[in-house]
Amino acid sequence: MITNQAGLSFSQALGNGFRQTIAGIFARNQLTPKVMLSGHQQETIKRAVKSEGEYIIAVQDTTYYNYTGHQQLSGIGKIQGKIKGLLQHNLMLLNQQGMPLGVFYQEYWTRKGGSMDLAEGEKESEKWFKGLEALREETTEVEHKIVLVEDREADIFDFFKAERGDKIELLVRVHEPRKLELVRDGRVTSLPELSQYLPEYGEKTVQVRRKNREVAVRVRLKAGEVNVYPRADLSPARHKTQGLSVVIAEEIDCVDVKTQERVEQEAAGTSWLLLTSLAVGNREEVERVVEFYAMRWRIEQFHFTLKSGGLRVEKLQFDDVHTLTNALSFYSVIAWQIMAITYQVRENPEQVATEVLPEEEVALLERVTRRKVGTAKDVMVALGKLVGFAPSKRQPLPGTKVVGQALERFYFIKQGFEQSKVSPLQNPTR
């Protein structure tokens, strides 16, 4: 139900009476974000098991929510300076084509003065290890290789050496100027100097999100096997990593996918330094590493959907942080649903419409748009029509933000039909 109410406050979306009922459920002591996500996690694993291809991509990242203006919210702490809020760490599974399969792991904390502050001595960096542990322990049914992808915040030597098991591969964007040893000749060099000693593997174009827009980035590739040296007080012979490689993707050009205009390159994004346990013995393998890393932007889109791209969860108003985190986990599943619909339609636009929406909602959509809705593509176009989206050659289908706005509008339409006791299945346009 909430899927079709994207962007409303809780009271607006549910009505005050129902809002109080749901808020009461979220407030229960025995209910936690882990419990909230348990059923969704099981379904996510099932989708992973059924996925085609050799790999499942697991991307994890952290976002924060600003609740400084919510004066009555108890238990909230400061997360940066005077900003009150909380942090949320997510691990999302994707199939090999980048289709979001679900939110697999999630945790919350505050930094200062909140009821969810980390325990003394506990580090925020442990989130990466917890995500890895969850994958290792809870994906026994999944036979695919699982590629765990992280950005520069996970550039932690101990994380590179953490136990992964036989089927989990590592892919981290690194930046720390550590010493590395080239396996092929034993040369020891620093990360900034590494590029000159690696063989080239041609060029590759991948799509990523940058400043909330799709861009096509062309990169020049270099790669080689390396051992990463530990900190200076540890013996490299005893403590260096084994079985890792580096792929360097140097950005050559960047183009906006929608407008085809050239995008000015950012200094911080001119080179991707990727440390991985995946093989890089030929051009195909090197390109695969870059393709998998490019999928990391899916989780940024997930966070955008939650915060700015339709759901606007920073506007949620609850009395305490326990209730709030349960609601955020609930809305996390809704954000995944919005993304999944978008990608599902893009992946197979000709699938039957009822694979995307229930039959009664498809019938109602036909009625209010006065057009036949037989395929998944028809669903997206019809939803877009509700908020004025006009298909074009450059953008034939609406994006995530438009889908969120359309589902919000569709919710009001459904409420109108229900209140007037008009069945959406009576005389739908055919």
Image: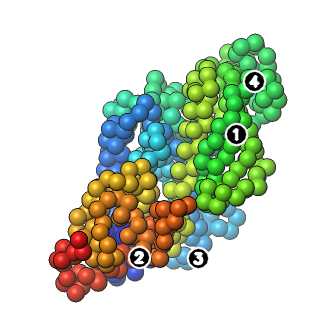
Can the viewer see residue 411 in this picture?
no
Residue topped by disc 4? 198
Label 2: few (<14), some or many (≥20) within 10 Å? many
Q: CA distance from mark 3 to mark 1?
A: 43 Å
Mark 4 or mark 2: whose residue is earlier in sequence = 4
For badge 2, the amino acid type reads: Leu
Circle 3 sits on which residue?
A: 69
| The furthest residue to the front | 393
Q: Nearer the viewer, mark 1 or mark 4?
A: 1
The residue that label 1 is drawn on is 219
Q: Indicate the position of residue 197 as horizontal and vertical percent values.
A: 79, 23
Q: Earlier in the sequence, mark 3 or mark 2?
A: 3
Q: Quadrant of residue 324?
A: bottom left
Observer-nearest residue: 63 or 198?
198
If the image is split into quadrants, where does the C terminus sit? bottom left
Measure the C-alpha gap from mark 3 to mark 4: 51 Å
